[in-house]
Image (spheres, rainbow, N blue to C red):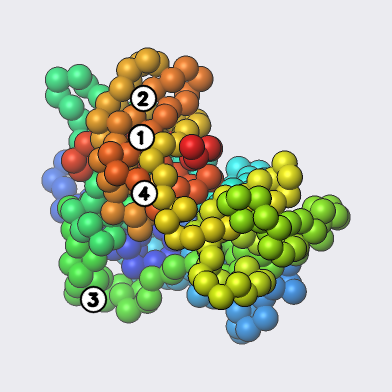
Amino acid sequence: MSIAIAMSGGVDSSTAAALLAENNSTAASGSQEVVGLTMQLWNQRRLPQLLGEEVGEGGRASGRCCSLDDVYDARAVANFLNIPYYVINLEKQFEAAVVRPFVEGYLAGETPIPCSLCNTEIKFSQFLTTARQIGAKRIATGHYARIRRDEKTGRFQLLRGVDRTKDQAYFLFGLTQEQLSYTDFPLGEMTKQEVRAIARARNLPVAAKPDSQEICFVPTGSYRQFIDAYLAEQQRPSPSSAGEVVSTDGNVLAEHQGIQNFTVGQRKGLGMAVGEPLYVISLDPAKNRVVVGDDRDLFRSRFQVREVNWIRPLAAGGAVDAHVKIRHNHPGAPARVEAHAGSEAFVEFTEPQRAITPGQAAVFYDGDEVVGGGWISGVE
Protein backbone atom coordinates (compact mmCIF):
# COMPACT_ATOMS: atom_id res chain seq x y z
CA MET A 1 0.00 0.00 0.00
CA SER A 2 1.28 3.49 -0.76
CA ILE A 3 0.50 6.97 0.56
CA ALA A 4 0.83 10.09 -1.61
CA ILE A 5 2.12 13.20 0.14
CA ALA A 6 1.39 16.59 -1.40
CA MET A 7 4.76 18.35 -1.55
CA SER A 8 4.67 22.11 -2.02
CA GLY A 9 8.40 22.63 -1.54
CA GLY A 10 7.91 24.27 1.85
CA VAL A 11 9.17 23.14 5.24
CA ASP A 12 5.78 21.85 6.38
CA SER A 13 5.01 19.40 3.59
CA SER A 14 8.69 18.41 3.42
CA THR A 15 8.75 17.57 7.13
CA ALA A 16 5.50 15.64 6.78
CA ALA A 17 7.07 13.65 3.94
CA ALA A 18 10.16 12.97 6.06
CA LEU A 19 8.05 11.67 8.95
CA LEU A 20 6.06 9.40 6.65
CA ALA A 21 9.23 8.09 5.03
CA GLU A 22 10.74 7.34 8.44
CA ASN A 23 7.62 5.50 9.55
CA ASN A 24 7.79 3.44 6.37
CA SER A 25 11.46 2.53 6.85
CA THR A 26 10.99 1.49 10.50
CA ALA A 27 7.76 -0.48 10.05
CA ALA A 28 8.33 -4.20 10.44
CA SER A 29 5.40 -5.24 8.31
CA GLY A 30 2.48 -3.75 6.44
CA SER A 31 4.57 -0.71 5.52
CA GLN A 32 3.33 1.77 2.97
CA GLU A 33 5.45 3.27 0.24
CA VAL A 34 5.60 7.07 0.33
CA VAL A 35 5.21 8.87 -3.00
CA GLY A 36 5.75 12.62 -3.33
CA LEU A 37 3.42 14.56 -5.63
CA THR A 38 3.66 18.25 -6.48
CA MET A 39 0.69 19.97 -8.07
CA GLN A 40 1.67 22.40 -10.82
CA LEU A 41 -1.18 24.89 -10.51
CA TRP A 42 -0.24 28.09 -12.30
CA ASN A 43 2.13 28.94 -15.12
CA GLN A 44 4.35 31.55 -13.51
CA ARG A 45 5.32 32.92 -16.93
CA ARG A 46 1.77 33.99 -17.65
CA LEU A 47 0.97 37.67 -17.32
CA PRO A 48 4.66 38.66 -17.65
CA GLN A 49 3.81 42.31 -17.04
CA LEU A 50 3.26 41.37 -13.40
CA LEU A 51 6.47 39.44 -12.80
CA GLY A 52 9.09 42.18 -12.61
CA GLU A 53 11.77 41.26 -10.10
CA GLU A 54 9.91 38.13 -9.10
CA VAL A 55 11.66 36.27 -11.90
CA GLY A 56 15.17 35.18 -11.07
CA GLU A 57 17.75 33.05 -12.83
CA GLY A 58 16.37 30.73 -15.48
CA GLY A 59 13.09 32.62 -15.53
CA ARG A 60 11.97 31.07 -12.26
CA ALA A 61 9.43 32.91 -10.15
CA SER A 62 10.09 32.81 -6.45
CA GLY A 63 8.79 33.89 -3.09
CA ARG A 64 5.30 32.45 -3.42
CA CYS A 65 3.54 29.16 -2.77
CA CYS A 66 3.58 26.82 -5.78
CA SER A 67 6.21 28.75 -7.75
CA LEU A 68 8.70 26.93 -9.96
CA ASP A 69 11.31 27.34 -7.23
CA ASP A 70 8.99 25.38 -4.95
CA VAL A 71 8.79 22.54 -7.48
CA TYR A 72 12.59 22.37 -7.56
CA ASP A 73 12.72 22.39 -3.76
CA ALA A 74 10.13 19.64 -3.49
CA ARG A 75 12.08 17.48 -5.93
CA ALA A 76 15.29 18.07 -3.95
CA VAL A 77 13.58 16.97 -0.74
CA ALA A 78 12.13 13.86 -2.40
CA ASN A 79 15.59 12.95 -3.72
CA PHE A 80 17.05 13.55 -0.27
CA LEU A 81 14.43 11.24 1.27
CA ASN A 82 14.85 8.72 -1.55
CA ILE A 83 11.14 8.53 -2.33
CA PRO A 84 9.46 8.45 -5.76
CA TYR A 85 8.41 11.91 -6.93
CA TYR A 86 6.12 13.22 -9.65
CA VAL A 87 4.78 16.60 -10.77
CA ILE A 88 1.15 16.60 -11.85
CA ASN A 89 -0.18 19.39 -14.02
CA LEU A 90 -3.49 20.73 -12.73
CA GLU A 91 -3.28 24.18 -14.30
CA LYS A 92 -6.55 23.90 -16.24
CA GLN A 93 -8.46 22.65 -13.23
CA PHE A 94 -6.93 25.31 -11.00
CA GLU A 95 -7.80 28.12 -13.37
CA ALA A 96 -11.39 26.91 -13.73
CA ALA A 97 -12.01 26.20 -10.04
CA VAL A 98 -9.94 28.91 -8.33
CA VAL A 99 -8.62 31.70 -10.57
CA ARG A 100 -11.78 32.47 -12.53
CA PRO A 101 -14.05 32.42 -9.44
CA PHE A 102 -11.50 34.70 -7.74
CA VAL A 103 -11.75 37.24 -10.56
CA GLU A 104 -15.52 36.96 -10.93
CA GLY A 105 -15.96 37.32 -7.18
CA TYR A 106 -14.13 40.64 -7.07
CA LEU A 107 -16.04 41.90 -10.11
CA ALA A 108 -19.27 41.02 -8.27
CA GLY A 109 -18.30 43.07 -5.21
CA GLU A 110 -17.06 40.16 -3.07
CA THR A 111 -13.71 39.47 -1.43
CA PRO A 112 -12.85 35.89 -2.38
CA ILE A 113 -10.62 33.55 -0.40
CA PRO A 114 -8.86 31.36 -2.98
CA CYS A 115 -6.99 29.13 -0.51
CA SER A 116 -10.21 27.50 0.69
CA LEU A 117 -11.39 26.94 -2.88
CA CYS A 118 -8.02 25.46 -3.77
CA ASN A 119 -8.13 23.05 -0.83
CA THR A 120 -11.66 21.91 -1.58
CA GLU A 121 -11.56 21.75 -5.37
CA ILE A 122 -7.91 20.98 -6.11
CA LYS A 123 -5.68 19.88 -3.22
CA PHE A 124 -8.10 17.24 -2.02
CA SER A 125 -10.59 16.48 -4.79
CA GLN A 126 -8.20 16.46 -7.76
CA PHE A 127 -5.23 15.32 -5.68
CA LEU A 128 -7.12 12.35 -4.25
CA THR A 129 -8.25 11.33 -7.73
CA THR A 130 -4.69 11.50 -9.09
CA ALA A 131 -3.29 9.64 -6.09
CA ARG A 132 -5.71 6.80 -6.68
CA GLN A 133 -4.74 6.66 -10.34
CA ILE A 134 -1.13 5.89 -9.37
CA GLY A 135 -2.24 3.26 -6.87
CA ALA A 136 -2.04 5.23 -3.62
CA LYS A 137 -4.52 4.20 -0.97
CA ARG A 138 -4.19 7.31 1.18
CA ILE A 139 -3.08 10.93 0.87
CA ALA A 140 -1.30 13.27 3.27
CA THR A 141 -0.54 16.98 3.42
CA GLY A 142 1.42 19.35 5.65
CA HIS A 143 -1.65 21.18 6.96
CA TYR A 144 -1.86 22.08 10.63
CA ALA A 145 -5.14 20.31 11.32
CA ARG A 146 -6.30 16.99 12.74
CA ILE A 147 -8.73 14.25 11.75
CA ARG A 148 -10.47 12.00 14.24
CA ARG A 149 -13.05 9.27 13.79
CA ASP A 150 -16.08 9.47 16.06
CA GLU A 151 -16.47 5.93 17.37
CA LYS A 152 -20.15 6.45 18.17
CA THR A 153 -21.26 7.70 14.76
CA GLY A 154 -18.49 6.35 12.56
CA ARG A 155 -18.09 9.78 10.98
CA PHE A 156 -14.82 11.65 10.62
CA GLN A 157 -14.23 14.91 12.43
CA LEU A 158 -12.03 17.81 11.35
CA LEU A 159 -10.21 19.44 14.27
CA ARG A 160 -8.01 22.50 14.68
CA GLY A 161 -4.28 21.94 14.74
CA VAL A 162 -2.62 21.92 18.15
CA ASP A 163 -0.65 25.04 17.19
CA ARG A 164 -3.39 27.67 17.17
CA THR A 165 -1.06 30.24 15.61
CA LYS A 166 -0.68 28.04 12.52
CA ASP A 167 -4.06 26.28 12.55
CA GLN A 168 -5.38 25.74 9.02
CA ALA A 169 -8.67 23.96 9.72
CA TYR A 170 -10.46 27.19 8.73
CA PHE A 171 -9.37 26.65 5.12
CA LEU A 172 -10.50 23.01 5.11
CA PHE A 173 -14.19 23.37 5.97
CA GLY A 174 -15.21 22.08 2.52
CA LEU A 175 -13.75 18.59 2.96
CA THR A 176 -16.16 15.70 2.56
CA GLN A 177 -16.40 12.56 4.66
CA GLU A 178 -14.75 10.58 1.87
CA GLN A 179 -11.83 12.99 1.63
CA LEU A 180 -11.38 13.03 5.40
CA SER A 181 -11.44 9.23 5.54
CA TYR A 182 -8.50 8.96 3.12
CA THR A 183 -6.39 11.83 4.50
CA ASP A 184 -3.61 12.10 7.08
CA PHE A 185 -2.24 15.31 8.62
CA PRO A 186 1.14 14.30 10.13
CA LEU A 187 1.76 17.77 11.58
CA GLY A 188 -1.58 18.26 13.30
CA GLU A 189 -0.28 17.48 16.78
CA MET A 190 2.85 19.61 16.40
CA THR A 191 3.81 23.25 16.75
CA LYS A 192 5.61 25.15 14.02
CA GLN A 193 8.70 25.31 16.22
CA GLU A 194 8.70 21.53 16.55
CA VAL A 195 8.35 21.12 12.79
CA ARG A 196 11.28 23.47 12.15
CA ALA A 197 13.35 21.55 14.70
CA ILE A 198 12.56 18.24 12.99
CA ALA A 199 13.50 19.68 9.60
CA ARG A 200 16.82 20.98 10.95
CA ALA A 201 17.61 17.75 12.79
CA ARG A 202 17.10 15.75 9.59
CA ASN A 203 19.03 18.26 7.48
CA LEU A 204 16.17 18.74 5.05
CA PRO A 205 17.20 21.04 2.16
CA VAL A 206 14.36 23.46 3.00
CA ALA A 207 14.83 23.54 6.78
CA ALA A 208 15.52 27.30 6.80
CA LYS A 209 13.12 28.25 4.00
CA PRO A 210 10.71 31.02 5.05
CA ASP A 211 6.96 30.49 4.89
CA SER A 212 5.03 31.79 1.90
CA GLN A 213 2.27 34.26 2.69
CA GLU A 214 1.09 35.48 -0.70
CA ILE A 215 -1.58 34.20 -3.08
CA CYS A 216 0.32 31.89 -5.40
CA PHE A 217 -1.00 33.32 -8.68
CA VAL A 218 -0.74 37.01 -7.71
CA PRO A 219 2.99 37.77 -8.03
CA THR A 220 2.88 41.43 -7.05
CA GLY A 221 0.56 40.95 -4.10
CA SER A 222 -1.91 43.31 -5.78
CA TYR A 223 -5.12 41.52 -6.73
CA ARG A 224 -6.22 44.66 -8.62
CA GLN A 225 -3.24 44.43 -10.96
CA PHE A 226 -3.84 40.72 -11.41
CA ILE A 227 -7.49 41.19 -12.34
CA ASP A 228 -6.65 43.86 -14.93
CA ALA A 229 -3.90 41.72 -16.46
CA TYR A 230 -6.02 38.57 -16.47
CA LEU A 231 -8.98 40.27 -18.12
CA ALA A 232 -6.65 41.74 -20.76
CA GLU A 233 -5.15 38.32 -21.44
CA GLN A 234 -8.63 36.83 -21.81
CA GLN A 235 -9.49 39.68 -24.18
CA ARG A 236 -12.32 40.67 -21.90
CA PRO A 237 -13.08 44.37 -21.52
CA SER A 238 -12.73 45.76 -18.05
CA PRO A 239 -16.13 46.24 -16.43
CA SER A 240 -17.75 49.64 -16.46
CA SER A 241 -15.66 51.33 -13.83
CA ALA A 242 -17.09 54.75 -13.09
CA GLY A 243 -19.46 54.77 -10.16
CA GLU A 244 -20.42 56.66 -7.05
CA VAL A 245 -19.00 56.60 -3.57
CA VAL A 246 -21.91 57.36 -1.26
CA SER A 247 -22.46 57.77 2.45
CA THR A 248 -24.72 55.43 4.39
CA ASP A 249 -27.56 57.95 4.00
CA GLY A 250 -27.11 58.10 0.21
CA ASN A 251 -25.18 61.34 -0.25
CA VAL A 252 -22.73 61.21 -3.15
CA LEU A 253 -19.21 61.93 -1.88
CA ALA A 254 -16.93 61.03 -4.78
CA GLU A 255 -16.48 58.88 -7.85
CA HIS A 256 -14.71 55.51 -7.95
CA GLN A 257 -13.13 53.57 -10.82
CA GLY A 258 -14.46 50.08 -10.13
CA ILE A 259 -15.95 48.25 -7.15
CA GLN A 260 -13.36 45.50 -7.65
CA ASN A 261 -10.87 47.96 -6.16
CA PHE A 262 -12.58 47.94 -2.77
CA THR A 263 -13.34 45.55 0.05
CA VAL A 264 -15.47 45.83 3.17
CA GLY A 265 -13.55 47.45 6.03
CA GLN A 266 -11.09 49.24 3.73
CA ARG A 267 -9.99 52.67 4.92
CA LYS A 268 -7.05 53.70 2.73
CA GLY A 269 -7.24 54.36 -0.98
CA LEU A 270 -10.82 55.68 -1.03
CA GLY A 271 -9.78 58.62 -3.20
CA MET A 272 -11.24 61.36 -1.06
CA ALA A 273 -10.67 63.31 2.13
CA VAL A 274 -13.56 64.51 4.27
CA GLY A 275 -11.75 65.33 7.50
CA GLU A 276 -12.71 62.16 9.35
CA PRO A 277 -11.88 58.45 8.87
CA LEU A 278 -14.24 56.66 6.50
CA TYR A 279 -14.47 52.94 5.81
CA VAL A 280 -16.04 50.84 3.10
CA ILE A 281 -19.28 49.54 4.62
CA SER A 282 -20.68 47.62 1.66
CA LEU A 283 -20.48 47.25 -2.11
CA ASP A 284 -23.52 47.45 -4.38
CA PRO A 285 -22.66 45.87 -7.75
CA ALA A 286 -26.19 46.38 -9.11
CA LYS A 287 -25.82 50.15 -8.77
CA ASN A 288 -22.02 50.15 -9.05
CA ARG A 289 -21.81 51.95 -5.72
CA VAL A 290 -19.34 51.94 -2.86
CA VAL A 291 -20.99 52.75 0.46
CA VAL A 292 -18.77 54.34 3.11
CA GLY A 293 -19.32 55.31 6.72
CA ASP A 294 -17.95 55.38 10.25
CA ASP A 295 -16.21 52.43 11.84
CA ARG A 296 -19.30 51.73 13.95
CA ASP A 297 -21.28 51.17 10.74
CA LEU A 298 -19.15 48.12 10.02
CA PHE A 299 -20.62 46.13 12.90
CA ARG A 300 -23.35 43.63 12.03
CA SER A 301 -24.90 40.62 13.73
CA ARG A 302 -26.73 38.56 11.10
CA PHE A 303 -25.64 37.26 7.71
CA GLN A 304 -26.35 34.57 5.14
CA VAL A 305 -24.03 31.74 4.11
CA ARG A 306 -24.22 29.77 0.84
CA GLU A 307 -22.83 26.40 -0.26
CA VAL A 308 -22.59 25.19 3.32
CA ASN A 309 -20.71 21.95 3.92
CA TRP A 310 -21.82 20.28 7.15
CA ILE A 311 -19.03 18.01 8.40
CA ARG A 312 -21.25 17.24 11.36
CA PRO A 313 -24.70 16.77 9.79
CA LEU A 314 -27.42 19.31 10.50
CA ALA A 315 -30.75 18.95 8.71
CA ALA A 316 -32.54 21.89 7.12
CA GLY A 317 -34.57 23.63 9.79
CA GLY A 318 -32.13 22.70 12.53
CA ALA A 319 -29.93 25.07 14.47
CA VAL A 320 -26.74 24.87 16.47
CA ASP A 321 -24.84 27.16 18.81
CA ALA A 322 -21.28 27.55 17.55
CA HIS A 323 -18.16 29.67 17.64
CA VAL A 324 -18.03 31.31 14.20
CA LYS A 325 -15.03 32.76 12.41
CA ILE A 326 -15.68 35.16 9.51
CA ARG A 327 -12.07 35.31 8.27
CA HIS A 328 -8.89 33.45 9.07
CA ASN A 329 -7.48 36.02 11.50
CA HIS A 330 -10.86 36.59 13.17
CA PRO A 331 -10.83 35.20 16.74
CA GLY A 332 -14.36 33.88 16.31
CA ALA A 333 -17.42 34.70 18.38
CA PRO A 334 -20.49 32.91 19.77
CA ALA A 335 -23.38 32.67 17.31
CA ARG A 336 -26.53 30.77 16.45
CA VAL A 337 -26.37 28.96 13.10
CA GLU A 338 -29.63 28.00 11.38
CA ALA A 339 -29.52 25.45 8.56
CA HIS A 340 -31.82 26.18 5.61
CA ALA A 341 -32.69 24.23 2.49
CA GLY A 342 -30.44 24.45 -0.54
CA SER A 343 -27.16 24.33 1.41
CA GLU A 344 -27.79 27.75 2.94
CA ALA A 345 -27.55 28.92 6.52
CA PHE A 346 -28.16 32.05 8.54
CA VAL A 347 -25.78 33.10 11.29
CA GLU A 348 -26.57 35.51 14.10
CA PHE A 349 -23.79 36.59 16.43
CA THR A 350 -24.51 37.17 20.10
CA GLU A 351 -22.57 40.42 19.79
CA PRO A 352 -22.11 42.42 16.53
CA GLN A 353 -18.87 41.70 14.66
CA ARG A 354 -16.81 44.04 12.51
CA ALA A 355 -16.57 43.83 8.70
CA ILE A 356 -18.57 40.72 7.83
CA THR A 357 -17.47 40.44 4.20
CA PRO A 358 -19.28 38.69 1.31
CA GLY A 359 -17.01 36.19 -0.41
CA GLN A 360 -15.10 35.27 2.73
CA ALA A 361 -15.59 31.94 4.49
CA ALA A 362 -17.69 31.58 7.62
CA VAL A 363 -16.58 28.52 9.58
CA PHE A 364 -18.52 27.03 12.48
CA TYR A 365 -16.70 25.47 15.45
CA ASP A 366 -17.65 23.40 18.48
CA GLY A 367 -14.52 23.72 20.56
CA ASP A 368 -11.72 22.37 18.36
CA GLU A 369 -14.10 20.63 15.98
CA VAL A 370 -15.11 22.20 12.67
CA VAL A 371 -18.87 21.60 12.44
CA GLY A 372 -19.18 23.11 8.97
CA GLY A 373 -18.75 26.23 6.93
CA GLY A 374 -19.66 28.10 3.77
CA TRP A 375 -19.33 31.36 1.88
CA ILE A 376 -20.70 34.64 3.20
CA SER A 377 -23.27 35.84 0.66
CA GLY A 378 -25.29 38.59 2.32
CA VAL A 379 -25.15 40.78 5.41
CA GLU A 380 -28.20 42.18 7.18
Q: For this rendering, which residue is in front, 71 or 54? A: 54
Q: CA distance from mark 1 to mark 3?
A: 46 Å
Identity of the amino acid at label 4?
Gln
Q: Are marks 2 and 3 in contact (CB under 8 Å)?
A: no
Q: For this rendering, which residue is in front, 186 or 86? A: 186
Q: Is residue 223 left or right of residue 193?
A: right
Q: For this rendering, which residue is in front, 264 or 231? A: 264
- For residue 348, the mark is 1
Percent coordinates x, y for residue 112 in the rendering? 55, 50
Q: Which residue is mark 2?
A: 338
Q: CA distance from mark 1 to mark 4?
A: 10 Å
Percent coordinates x, y for residue 158 in the rendering? 27, 38
Q: Which residue is mark 3?
A: 200
For marks 1 and 2, the one nearer the N-term is: 2
Residue at x-position 32% and y-position 79%: 208
Question: Tag 1's secondary structure?
Answer: strand
Q: Is residue 125 left or right of residue 218?
A: left
Q: For this rendering, which residue is in front, 197 or 86? A: 197
Percent coordinates x, y for residue 6 in the rendering? 41, 52
For marks 1 and 4, the one nearer the N-term is: 1
For marks 4 and 2, the one nearer the N-term is: 2
Question: Tag 3's secondary structure?
Answer: helix
Quadrant of the image containing the N terminus: top left
- For residue 353, the mark is 4
